[in-house]
Amino acid sequence: MFKTFKEDIDVVFDQDPAARNYFEVVLTYSGLHAIWAHRVAHAFFKRRFFFLARVISQISRFFTGVEIHPGAKIGRRFFIDHGMGVVIGETCEIGDNVTLFQGVTLGGTGKEKGKRHPTIRDNALIATGAKVLGSIVVGENSKVGAGSVVLKDVPPNSTVVGIPGKVVIQDGVKIQKDLNHCDLPDPINDRIKQLQSEIEELRSLLQEEHGRSRSS
């Protein structure tokens, strides 16, 4: 357990350039506190102490602003940046080396039973305010852009943006865990530009045809 706690601290230094020293990280990082509280709550949950597990998770939610259901399965080196407003549902499964930013929801889509929350594979990154909903899978090394709403499976090594989320990059090459939130691809804008280009082409053809008819 202590080895896992140390890994949780070390990943903060790997992912957050603002982290200065262990003392500061241990005392002031709410995302780290939420992860630690969840690991304790999840241990009670697995032993069927459901009420105690929920009490721990709700106390953690009150102090950290991060709500993680004690039934969620979270892997190693999980990092929550800032953390406020993060919600992780009961049947979520999160792999190793996953990063979430503030305002992320890993939730369900209704009152369905069984597996109703997302599975996030290793090395995935979910950016600020993104919503990943339903029993879907975000593949290894994939990224979800800020503000996106993802309702379908995301293939490995992909980048998804938009509402609803659409895959805009998928090349089979491992994607590094850096995401420029200010310079995301915009598939809607790209489509508008394509339509504008087609309109201009049609307008040019109509003008040429009009010129021929006048000359004849």
Image (cartoon, rainbow, N blue to C red):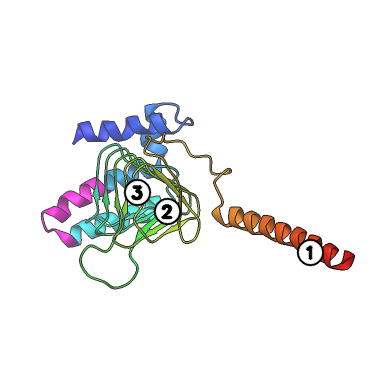
Q: Quadrant of the N terminus?
A: top left
Q: Is residue 30 above or below residue 44?
A: above
Q: Quadrant of the C terminus?
A: bottom right
Q: Residue at x 23, y 46 (%)?
A: 39
Name the residue nearer the viewer: 24 or 102: 102
Label 2 residue SS: loop
Residue type at mark 1? Glu
| Occupied quadrant, residue 2 | top left
Mark 1, Cα crowd under 10 Å, few <14 / some 14-19 / many 20+, is few
Q: Residue at x 33, y 71 (%)?
A: 110
Q: Nearer the viewer, mark 2 or mark 3?
A: 3
Name the residue nearer the viewer: 80 or 133: 133
Residue 142 in magenta? no
Residue at the top extreme, as displayed:
21
User: Which is more N-terminal, label 3 or label 2?
Assistant: 2
Q: Position of residue 73 (x, y in %)?
A: 23, 50
Provide the residue designation for mark 3: 155
Q: Tell me how far mark 3 sits from mark 1, CA to CA.
A: 47 Å
Q: Tell me how far mark 1 sits from mark 2, CA to CA.
A: 54 Å
User: Which is more N-terminal, label 2 or label 1?
Assistant: 2
Provide the residue designation for mark 2: 104
Name the residue nearer the viewer: 74 or 33: 74
Mark 2, Cα crowd under 10 Å, few <14 / some 14-19 / many 20+, is many
Q: Which residues are magenta?
A: 38-50
Report the disc number at residue 209. 1
Q: Residue at x 27, y 64 (%)?
A: 116
Residue 43 in magenta? yes
| Occupied quadrant, residue 59 | bottom left
Residue at the bottom extreme, as displayed:
111
Does residue 188 appear left or right of residue 6 in this picture? right
